[in-house]
Amino acid sequence: MKIKFVPVVDSRAQWGNKEAILKRYEGLNIYTLNRWLSEMRNSKQFRDGVINPTHKLVWINFVVFQDFLYWKQHGYPKIKAK
């Protein structure tokens, strides 16, 4: 799977829904995103990056999601103390 990051120009948003994540990371499909969000919810380190106010609504923190991807790649956080 080839995933390409697409920067969003002049964006000040810190949180977004699944569609926003899929737009930022071209090549990422919804099934992989759902599995990764489940991993984030189960991880003590990354669970604060996913909010589910209702069973249909989900908000994802862009910075925490990017840190999670780095952790998935390397197995450790990019910056140890945040």
Image (cartoon, helix red, strand yellow):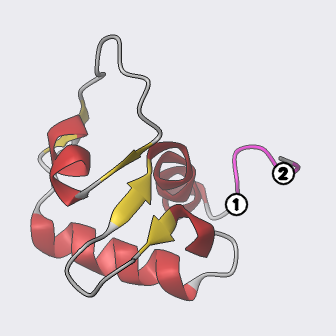
Residue beneath disc 1: 76
Does residue 78 show up magenta in the picture? yes
The N terminus sits in image quarter: bottom left
Q: How many callouts does the rendering have?
A: 2
Q: Position of residue 80 (x, y in %)?
A: 84, 51
Query: Relative to 72, does residue 36 appear above or below in the rendering?
Result: below
Q: In the picture, residue 32 is in which quadrant?
A: bottom left
Neighbor class of circle 1 (other Cα within 10 Å; few <14, some 14-19, many 20+) is few
Q: At 19% from the left edge and 80% from the top edge, which residue is drawn?
A: 56
Q: Position of residue 20 (x, y in %)?
A: 22, 45
Q: At 29% from the left edge and 80% from the top edge, which residue is drawn?
A: 35
Separation of marks 2 and 1 at Cα, in angstroms: 8 Å
Q: What span is colored magenta in the figure?
A: 77-81
Q: Which residue is at the front of the view, 56 or 20?
A: 56
Q: At 46% from the left edge and 68% from the top edge, which residue is drawn?
A: 50
Does residue 23 show up magenta in the picture? no
Q: Position of residue 33 (x, y in %)?
A: 24, 67
Query: Relative to 30, does residue 17 appear above or below in the rendering?
Result: above
Which label sits on residue 80?
A: 2
Query: Relative to 12, does residue 45 appear above or below in the rendering?
Result: below
Please state which amino acid type lies under the numbered disc 1: Tyr
- Answer left or right for 18 relative to 62: left
Query: Relative to 70, does residue 51 appear above or below in the rendering?
Result: below
Q: At 70% from the left edge and 45% from the top edge, which residue is drawn?
A: 78
- Answer left or right for 64 relative to 34: right
Q: Which residue sits furthest front?
A: 53
Q: Position of residue 68 (x, y in %)?
A: 53, 59
